[in-house]
Image (cartoon, rainbow, N blue to C red):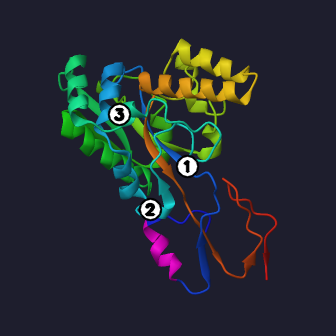
């Protein structure tokens, strides 16, 4: 079973002759992606208020449960990878008073904040519930919009306002290897409407991505990656929901399983 869902891990672990094992050394990075084109999430103060309203461990504890399968990680890069950094971590550390103050500074008047809610996804469903409850606590007028994951994949391409079936946030995840540095992450690119849904645009982020590509030494690359992370949080690109792992379930007579971010189906044999 390529991806044993978190709620069923304890059950599968008890099955005779079955192993449940994390073969992914990097894991996944959870995201709460903002829509930067549509109000009220088009306001950076609103996005920063949402970031301060949430607690990363609430996501991980609720959706994953087993502490052995998650890591609180306030970096945009996975723990254990070369560019992991604490730069800007204070911007994504929960502080409800700061969140309320940012909402007030933004002039928020209770406009609907629409979150696309994939009720059929075992991780993104609880992620959405945690966000909704956390944002309500500081004064957001949250409107969850229930749908299945395939529908969300289509709906998130809409750039219409909330009043016309638009959205302000959806939750997703990236394989850790896809966000290992500022260049590999499709969602990191800040090229506006030519980019990935959410469409954030920032010249400084794009300059830093270019600086990373041309860095002459590993030390210089690390410095640029830290600046990139700080800027990503400054503009409120997305909520960092943390790092988690999805184990593989297989019978104990299957040999040759490969440790990798994506499960390969070669080199395997039944002994």
Residue drawn at 21 percent across, 25 percent down: 101
Q: Which residues are magenta?
A: 7-14
* Crowdedness near tag 3: few (<14), some (14–19) or many (≥20) residues, C-alpha within 10 Å: many
Q: Earlier in the sequence, mark 1 or mark 3?
A: 1
> Residue 149: in sight, yes or no?
yes
Q: Residue furthest front?
A: 219
Cα distance in 3D space between marks 2 and 1: 14 Å
> Residue 164: in sight, yes or no?
no
Q: Quadrant of the N terminus?
A: bottom right
State the residue position of label 2. Answer: 67
Mark seen at residue 28 = 1
State the residue position of label 3. Answer: 51
- Classify mark 1: helix, strand or loop: strand
* Crowdedness near tag 2: few (<14), some (14–19) or many (≥20) residues, C-alpha within 10 Å: few
Q: Quadrant of the C terminus?
A: bottom right
Q: Main secondary structure of the magenta part?
A: helix
Q: Position of residue 239 (x, y in %)?
A: 41, 36
Residue drawn at 80 percent across, 75 percent down: 269
Cα distance in 3D space between marks 2 and 3: 23 Å
């Amino acid at each position: 079973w390529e991806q044993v869902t978190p709620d069923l891990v304890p059950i599968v672990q008890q099955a005779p002759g079955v192993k449940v094992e994390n073969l992914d050394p990097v894991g996944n990075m959870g995201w709460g992606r903002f829509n930067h084109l549509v109000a009220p999430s088009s306001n950076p103060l609103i996005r920063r208020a949402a970031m301060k309203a949430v607690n990363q461990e609430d996501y991980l504890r609720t959706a994953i449960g087993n502490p052995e399968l998650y890591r609180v990680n306030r970096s945009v890069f996975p723990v254990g990878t070369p560019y992991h950094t604490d730069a800007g971590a204070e911007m994504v550390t929960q502080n409800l008073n700061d969140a309320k103050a940012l909402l007030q500074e933004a002039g928020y008047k209770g406009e609907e904040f629409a979150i696309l809610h994939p009720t059929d996804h075992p991780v993104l469903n609880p992620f959405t519930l945690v966000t909704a409850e956390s944002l309500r606590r500081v004064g957001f007028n949250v409107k969850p919009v229930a749908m299945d994951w395939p529908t969300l994949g289509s709906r998130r391409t809409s750039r219409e306002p909330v009043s016309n079936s638009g959205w302000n946030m959806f939750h997703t995840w990236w394989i850790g290897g896809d966000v290992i540095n500022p260049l590999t992450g499709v969602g990191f690119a800040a090229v506006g409407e030519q980019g990935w849904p959410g469409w954030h645009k920032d010249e400084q982020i794009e300059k830093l991505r270019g600086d990373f590509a041309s860095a002459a030494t590993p030390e210089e690359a690390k410095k640029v990656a830290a600046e990139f992370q700080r800027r990503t949080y400054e503009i409120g690109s997305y909520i960092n929901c943390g790092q988690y792992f999805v184990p593989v379930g297989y019978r104990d007579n299957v040999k040759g399983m490969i440790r990798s971010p994506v499960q390969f189906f070669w080199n395997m044999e039944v002994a």
